[in-house]
Image (cartoon, rainbow, N blue to C red):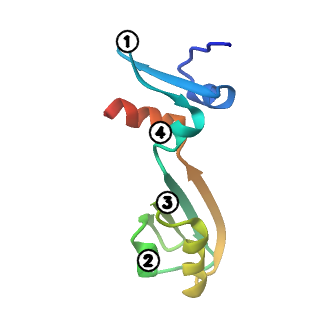
């Protein structure tokens, strides 16, 4: 067994199988990395459009956190809808996509959430 203490959460995420979070001398979480990452099931998707887009389909608009005529950023719970379903909505609405970038919750997001509780 190796115990690693670090404030660098990317390092912990890469090297550790089990993680404990300590705040003010108390263990506030102690679980496997996989289980901790399940605390936040949020995903963020940024889509860039091939052409200017004025209006998004309603189903897409429900998840939109920012938009301009060249791109939109969506945030959603992976348990409620998946990226493929959202992409199908764009395709069905005849919106051509240029690029797609995704971001999932990481240990830093989990750490912040744990400290707020």
Closer to the camera: disc 3 or disc 2? 3
Q: Which of the two residues, 59 or 41, is positioned nearer the viewer here?
A: 41
* Distance of label 4 from label 1 (alpha carbons): 21 Å
Residue at image point 54% right, 71% down: 70
The residue wearing badge 3 is 79
Q: Which type of secondary structure does the marked residue at label 4 adopt? A: helix
* Distance of label 3 from label 2 (alpha carbons): 16 Å
The residue wearing badge 4 is 109
- Please say if 46 is above or below 10: below
Tags 4 and 1 touching, CB below 8 Å: no
Is 14 on the left or on the right of 36, as rendered?
Answer: right
Sequence-wise, which precedes: disc 3 or disc 2? 2
Sequence-wise, which precedes: disc 1 or disc 3? 1
Determine which of the numbered discs, if any, sits on residue 59 in the image.
2
Q: Crowdedness of circle 2 by 10 Å Cα count: few (<14), some, many (20+)?
A: few
Sequence-wise, which precedes: disc 1 or disc 2? 1
Closer to the camera: disc 4 or disc 3? 3
- State the quadrant of the N terminus: top right
Q: Crowdedness of circle 3 by 10 Å Cα count: few (<14), some, many (20+)?
A: few
Determine which of the numbered discs, if any, sits on residue 91 in the image.
none
Quarter of the view holding residue 82: bottom right
* Distance of label 1 from label 2 (alpha carbons): 45 Å
């Amino acid at each position: 067994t190796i115990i690693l203490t670090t404030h660098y959460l990317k390092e912990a995420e890469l090297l550790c199988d089990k993680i404990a979070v300590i705040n003010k001398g108390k263990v506030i979480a102690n679980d496997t990395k996989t289980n901790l990452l399940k605390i936040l099931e949020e995903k963020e998707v940024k889509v860039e459009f091939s052409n200017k887009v004025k209006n998004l389909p309603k189903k897409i608009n429900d998840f939109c956190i920012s938009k301009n005529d060249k791109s939109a950023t969506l945030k959603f719970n992976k348990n409620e809808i998946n990226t493929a379903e959202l992409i199908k909505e764009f395709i069905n609405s005849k919106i051509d996509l240029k690029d797609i970038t995704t971001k999932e919750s990481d240990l830093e997001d989990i750490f912040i959430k744990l400290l707020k509780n």
